[in-house]
Image (cartoon, grey):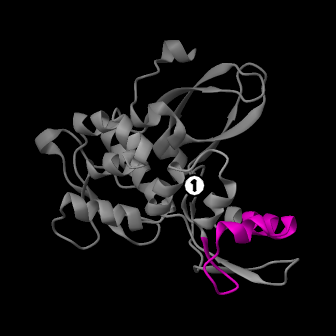
């Protein structure tokens, strides 16, 4: 990921190429982006991340200028793996690559402190860029003998997912199923589907990945257990310095 200065008038607009080949030109991050993160209404509607990125983006694609509405439309159409890469670029350019944070171990429940360099994790492949497969992808269903076609998550689907209740597993799956035996599936179709067919669908969705994978493995400082998290799910990713070295126990 190319580096650029980020200090007021000395900021040189940086154009990055996302894993899909789409280009994005960033603009200086300001306090307006941080203010977006405090908007509870945006959080409830699932639009918070989009508005955050809009504050840090000049243009997407080959356009010379873009209205806020055009930016939002482009972000909603963007593949989730590209959005992950874009968020990483925004974070590194806006606040620098160093990140100090705490994480709670799912095994012992204790907090441990960590310090990483995001740029180093990109460069050494800890955060890999995975090539996209052709989409939609056809999946054969082992019990019914039918098939389903699945697509990638996009910004629009992320927003819809954010508004679903926690137990809406089938509704979440519907967001990625393009067709079932050539027809648009319904919630009833999934509720009537055999368990092994559902399992095959979920496995295929998990394996069909593309773009930046920002998952990192951590070792608990208390019990030594290893577990994985998405680095972008940590509050300090968006608002650095919330956790200090001292409070993280580093």
Q: Which residue is mark 1?
A: 213
Return the residue nearer the eye: 118 or 106. Answer: 106
Name the residue furthest bottom.
Answer: 182
Residue 20 sits above or below residue 32 on the image: below
Residue 12 sits above or below residue 99 on the image: below
Name the residue furthest front.
Answer: 188
x, y (%) of residue 110?
A: 69, 19
Res 59 visible: no
In the image, is residue 182 part of the stretch drawn in magenta?
yes
Q: Residue at x 41, y 72 (%)?
A: 21
Q: Residue 189 is drawn in which quadrant?
A: bottom right
Q: Residue 153 is drawn in which quadrant?
A: bottom right
x, y (%) of residue 244?
A: 46, 18
In the image, is residue 7 part of the stretch drawn in magenta?
no
x, y (%) of residue 18?
A: 41, 64
Residue 22 sits above or below residue 103 on the image: below
Q: How many marks?
A: 1
Return the residue nearer the eye: 208 or 214. Answer: 208
- Which quadrant would the C terminus be assigned to in this image? top right
Q: Residue 5 is drawn in which quadrant?
A: top left
Q: Is residue 51 left or right of residue 118?
A: left
Q: Residue at x 38, y 35 (%)?
A: 40
Name the residue furthest left.
Answer: 9
Return the residue nearer the eye: 86 or 126. Answer: 86
How many neighbours does mark 1 have within 10 angstroms: few (below 14), some (14-19), or many (20 or more)? Answer: many
Q: Secondary structure at mark 1?
A: loop
Res 160 visible: yes
x, y (%) of residue 216?
A: 62, 43
- Residue range in magenta is 177-203
- Which quadrant would the N terminus be assigned to in this image? bottom left
Residue 143 sits above or below residue 24 on the image: below
């Amino acid at each position: 990921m190319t580096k650029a200065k980020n200090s007021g008038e000395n900021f040189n607009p940086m154009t990055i190429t996302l894993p899909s080949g789409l280009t994005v030109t960033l603009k200086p991050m300001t306090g307006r982006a941080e203010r977006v993160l405090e908007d509870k209404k945006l959080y409830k509607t699932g639009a918070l991340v989009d508005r955050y990125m809009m504050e840090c983006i000049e243009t997407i694609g080959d356009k010379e200028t873009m209205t806020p509405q055009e930016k939002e439309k482009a972000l909603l159409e963007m593949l989730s793996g590209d959005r992950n890469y874009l968020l990483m670029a925004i974070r590194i350019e806006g606040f620098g690559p160093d990140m100090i944070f705490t994480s709670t171990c799912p095994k012992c429940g204790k907090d441990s402190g960590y310090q990483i360099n995001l740029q180093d994790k990109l460069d050494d492949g800890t955060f890999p860029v995975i090539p996209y497969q052709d989409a939609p992808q056809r999946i054969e269903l082992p019990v019914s003998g039918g098939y389903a076609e699945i697509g990638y998550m996009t910004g629009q689907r992320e927003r819809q997912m954010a508004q679903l209740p926690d137990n809406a597993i089938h509704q979440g799956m519907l967001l990625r199923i393009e067709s079932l035996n050539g027809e648009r599936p319904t919630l009833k179709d999934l509720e009537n589907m055999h368990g092994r067919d559902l399992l095959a669908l979920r496995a295929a969705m998990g394996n069909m990945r593309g773009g930046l994978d920002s998952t990192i493995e951590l070792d608990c400082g208390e019990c030594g257990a290893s577990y994985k998290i998405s680095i972008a799910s940590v509050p300090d990713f968006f608002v650095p310095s919330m956790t200090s070295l001292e409070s993280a126990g580093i």
